[in-house]
Amino acid sequence: MKNCPQCHSEYPYQDGGLWICPDCAHEWTAEEAIAKAESLIIKDAHGNPLADGDSVSVIKDLKIKGSSSVVKVGTKVKNIRLVESSDGHNISCKIDGLGVMALKSEFIKKI
């Protein structure tokens, strides 16, 4: 196991058949971690699976909430990070000139 699935700590340890996070005290089995990882398959607008570190391109002008700025079609975003989100913004990234933001996978395509 790499990181805790709950708090993403880098220091989980194995105790028998369980993995334990010393930071948040979350306990899980290897099977639970595998099942969770398989359920977190995020795909781009064309159905291609995405992974952490991929480079993507925006396929639609996106208005930035609370700002007059727009992320233009064709904007390239490097080194994305996939996140779980209840509002659909499942990609965290940094866009040059605009900063850190969250995007929906339905508006991007993998390069």
Image (tube, rainbow, N blue to C red):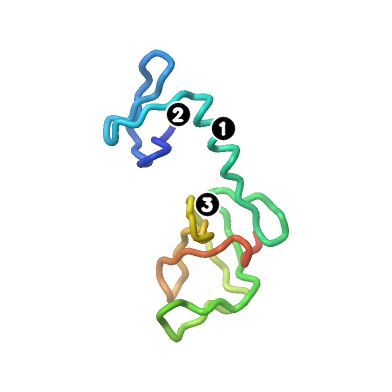
Residue at the far left: name it. 23
Image spot of residue 77 (x, y percent): 54, 65
Residue at the far bottom: name it. 68
Q: Residues within 10 Å of mark 3 (few under 14, many from 20)?
A: few
Q: Secondary structure at mark 1?
A: helix
Q: Quadrant location of the N terminus? A: top left
The three-letter amino acid code for the residue at tag 3 is Gly
The three-letter amino acid code for the residue at tag 2 is Met
Q: Residue 1 shows which numbered tag?
A: 2
Q: Earlier in the sequence, mark 3 or mark 1?
A: 1
Image spot of residue 56 (x, y percent): 60, 62
Decide if residue 111 is in sight here.
no
Q: Secondary structure at mark 3?
A: loop
Q: Earlier in the sequence, mark 1 or mark 2?
A: 2
Give the spatial CA distance, label 2 vs label 3. Answer: 19 Å
The residue under label 1 is: 35
Q: Which of 95 and 88 lies nearest the eye of the viewer?
A: 88
In the picture provided, is 103 more to the left or to the right than 26? right
Residue 9's place in the image compared with 78, above or below, is above
The residue under label 3 is: 53
Pair 3/1: label in front: 1
Q: Residue at x 29, y 31 (%)?
A: 25
Q: Earlier in the sequence, mark 2 or mark 3?
A: 2
